[in-house]
Amino acid sequence: MDRDPTSFQRWRLAELAWLLGFAMLTRWSALGDDGYFNDELFYFAAGHHLHDGLLPYVGVWDRKGPGLFLSYYLFAAFGRSPLCYQIPALLFAVGTAWAIRSLALRYTSRTGALAAATLYLAALPMYGGGSGQSPVFYNLFVALAALLAWQSAPELRQGQVSRRALLAMASAGFAITFKQTALFEAGFLGLWALWQLRASGLAALALAGRGLRLALAGTAPFALFALAFAVTGHFPEFRDAMIDANLRKPVDPGGDALGRAWALAFMGWPLVLLALAGLAIPLRAPSHGPASPRLFLTGWIAAAVLGVAAVPNFYEHYVLPLLVPLTAAAALALRHELWGLALGGLSALYCLAVGPSFNLVDRERSRAEMDALERDIRLRDPHPRPFVYQGPHSLYTRLESYPPSPLLDNFHLYFPPEDNVSRLDTRAEVLRNLAWRPSVVVVFADWPTSEENPRTAPLVRGYAARNCRLWFTRPFREVFRSYRLAVYGDCARSPGS
């Protein structure tokens, strides 16, 4: 490798430019599309609604962590275009890829490191991470934590808890504030740091003291959020959303978790094979750090798998946290200058072919359909009061109007396994929204009754039938699924209202 500082800097800039350009290529079709994935449409709608002075878990309810709410609150401050969160998501994805590259350089070649980072960006859209899903953001903090933990290994082995080690734990702890399942990866990194400390020969009491410092750094981000809610008098609501609601949520309600898990694993078979090959290939001695990264990477992958399995519903985006350690391990298999480029390139092409990155026509239709949906509602009702019982949350953002219930995410209202999972009675919250006399009601057309909450769906559909007129039906195209929407209006002016 050329050691000339100027040449080295140029290589770094070229690699960064490559990752940025490749990320743009893989995410271009989604930019500006607020029909891409309803999860992130809810986060963005919630972010705007929080600007009305509401608190997460009190005025807007969900099980996601406060870090995600805070992020989307900040994104919402820049406007109502989905670009307000999609551009940060793109930059976070590039930052995560750069962290993977920086970590992989510690134990493999420059080719392997850059190929792994590129493969991460290619795989994101394949699992629904081509826009603003939550792991696209918190994966960066997990990757940074892993990189910093690895870099701090020499100090830890000498019995010293360096700033880098504390920052590693704090970064992993901040990831938990986005989604609680990041606890498994954070826990692994903490245990690995303790194992490094133990190699220094510290006495048990000294080891415990240093371990406590690491634990405090890891728990500080979540603890600070908890303290903020306690100070405002809303710690019970915070605890309920973070802990109790997750325990109330049914596990594998459809009884098909294993089948879906297998389908998701099979879809990503090149990443799995490359990661396994990387862990099996004999390693060259790294320039610094632990003697071998194999145990580190194996433990990290196992922790990420546990994080996915902890909520065994296995939707596509649940796999996104696994992509970071898998590609970091795959870097070992991609280290050869010729074969690494070939295998990495073919694997990236596979991800792009299987995933939705180049579904340009569908995404353009989605943008046009969302624009037409808003326009046609406003033409009939310039100041609507919408209740989107089923359908895109972006209507709330576009129409700048929100129903009164904290259960803004309609998934909590219509999906049967979500009934009464929150601290609020689901039926009572639907009645609360209907008492608000919404002037526009949006539901799925021809939706099977078996997939609707029997305590709430008849209330909403009955309200629409008695008090509203069917204006029109329209498609709603998410990245992996399409629905037909039935839009009812003139509700407040109908005879039965």
Image (spheres, rainbow, N blue to C red):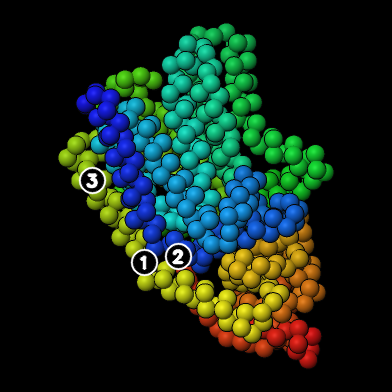
Q: Is residue 272 left or right of residue 30?
A: left
| Disc number placed over residue 359 in the picture, else none | 1
- In the rendered structure, which disc, 2 or 1, sits on the residue that comes first in sequence? 1
Q: Residue at x 57, y 79 (%)?
A: 375
Name the spot of residue 430 as percent of width and height, x first: 74, 70
Q: x and y percent of residue 411 in the render?
A: 62, 64
Seen in the picture, residue 177 relative to 472 is either above or below; the reply is above
214 above or below 385? above
Which label is found at residue 343? 3
Q: Can you tell which mark lies on residue 479?
A: 2
Q: For the N terminus, give its image quadrant.
A: top left
The residue positioned farthest toward the left in the image shown: 338
Between residues 65 and 268, which one lies in front from this camera angle?
65
Residue at 75%, 54% in the rendered image: 53
* Amino acid type, callout 1: Asn
Look at discs 2 and 3 and give the one toward the viewer.
Answer: 2
360 relative position to 391: left or right: left
Residue at position x 82%, y 43% in the image: 233
